[in-house]
Amino acid sequence: MKAKIVFVNAVSALRFPLAALTAWAMWAGRWEIAAAAYASGLVTDWIDGPIARALKAETEFGREWMEPAADLALLAGGIVGLVLIGIVPWWALALLAVGDRCVNYLVKPRVKRPQRILFVQAVFLEGTIAVISVFLLYRVDPRLAVAAVASAPIVAYAKRRRIREFAAWCFRE
């Protein structure tokens, strides 16, 4: 059982070096590497939860600490890359880090229904990831960015049930 837990946490932990690689590759102008590293990080984000559930290796550490930290690292890696090339001002990165921590540790504990804040955080995270992804795809080949934007409604339709279930959970009485 311990090996399964270590494996799942290792999948999540892959996002830390992938975030650094994304930022470095953006700074170096290596757009293919940046896009591949960022996409790989997104894949690990999508698969670590299902793998943990399939292996019955879910832990509080993974769910409450590793997953959010790895998500924030990947998001920060993309934003740091944008800061390094001058697209985003440095204060946006500081706002992301401070804002996320303030919401999690100051606002959520004082709100009657913290799930609603979770919903807003999830929408913000998805939107920011989409912007970074389209930017990286555009730098690799503008046709890829157009394809990604054009396929967004299809992906949204496929995710619609999961999003509805999440929203219903967040806004339940």
Image (cartoon, grey):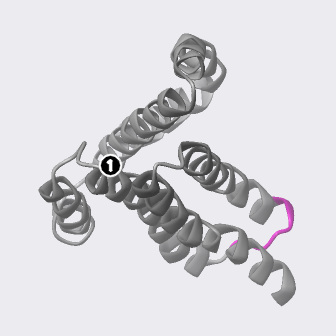
Q: Is residue 152 visible?
A: yes
**Residue 171 is one of the magenta-drawn residues:** no
In the image, the segment drawn in magenta is 54-58
Q: Is residue 27 above or below residue 130?
A: below
| Residue sitting nearer the eye, 128 or 37 | 37
- Residue at mark 1: 82
Identify residue type, mark 1. Leu
Left of 106 or right of it: where is 160? Answer: right
Residue 78: percent from left, percent from top = 41, 52
Q: Is residue 1 visible?
A: no
Left of 83 or right of it: where is 62? Answer: right
Mark 1, secondary structure of its residue = helix
Q: Is residue 66 above or below residue 91?
A: below
Residue at 71%, 68% in the rendered image: 11
Residue at 65%, 47% in the rendered image: 36
Q: Which quarter of the rendering shows the C terminus?
A: top left
Residue at 18%, 53% in the rendered image: 92
Residue 27: percent from left, percent from top = 40, 56
